[in-house]
Image (tube, rainbow, N blue to C red):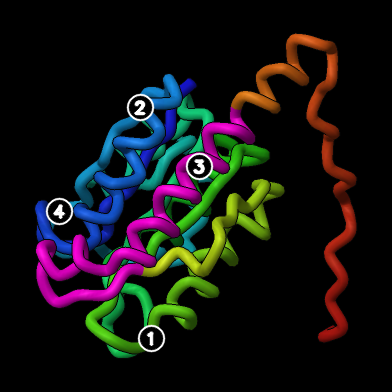
Amino acid sequence: MKVLMLNGSPRANGCTFTALSEAMKVLEEQGIECEIYQMGNKPVSGCIACGACAKLGHCFMEDTVNGFVEKARSADGFIFGTPVYYAAPNGSVMSFLDRAFYSGKDAFFGKPGACVVSCRRGGASASYDVLNKFFGISSMPIVTSTYWNQVHGNTPSEVLQDAEGIQTVQNLALNMAWLLKCIEAGKNSGVVRPEPITGNKTNFIR
């Protein structure tokens, strides 16, 4: 079993990475393979709603998004991390996830997901809510913790001083490992994931 993490910060070893690393330590102790995917600091274009991905099977923009989606296909669960910019997720991570889910929704569908947000002081809960919307539209069980998954600090060392934040991330990782093991046990017992009911898209604007 593998959990793929996204570091949505342009800083490879900053506060968001620190929080994800704490989750990774616990997951690996639970026997879960982990990988932190660095989004990087290059500009990420947003989705332009061209529909090309439906024909190509991937986004026509050949950048880091397509590489992440390919890794997602073999992952069993996800943790997305973002810094907080103006009480919202980093704009680049939103563009990244918009395109990843639009072009490769099947890579994420039905797999457990969680997010971790990093802020200096405020805006964490609003950013947390935004990222959870990606899971809610993709039939992904949302893994929770003992508080909302947020860490506070302006530097990695300050994040590590946020004892409750680190504890929350650790409990998140424990719950992710538990759920993945439950899903695996269910599969081994013949319990299969239900196929969604489709076909209806209500549109009141004619």
**Do callouts 2 and 3 mark residues in contact (Cβ within 8 Å)?**
no
Which amino acid does the dot numbered 1 rest on?
Gly
- Residue 190 in percent (x, y) is at 84, 12
**Does residue 79 belong to the magenta stretch?**
no
Task: Provide the secondary structure element on which disc 2 rests.
Answer: helix
Task: Provide the secondary structure element on which disc 4 rests.
Answer: loop
Task: Provide the secondary structure element on which disc 3 rests.
Answer: helix
Residue assigned mark 2: 28
Question: Which numbered marker is on residue 123?
Answer: 1
Precedes in sequence: disc 1 or disc 2: 2
Magenta stretch: helix, strand or loop mostly: helix
Residue assigned mark 3: 104
Identify which residue, 10 or 198, lies in the foreground. Answer: 10
Stretch of the chain drawn in magenta: 151-180
Q: Disc count in the image? A: 4
Sort mark 2 into few (<14), some (14-19) or many (20+) by Cα contacts within 10 Å. Answer: some
Identify which residue, 27 or 92, lies in the foreground. Answer: 27
Precedes in sequence: disc 3 or disc 1: 3
- Residue 127 in percent (x, y) is at 43, 76
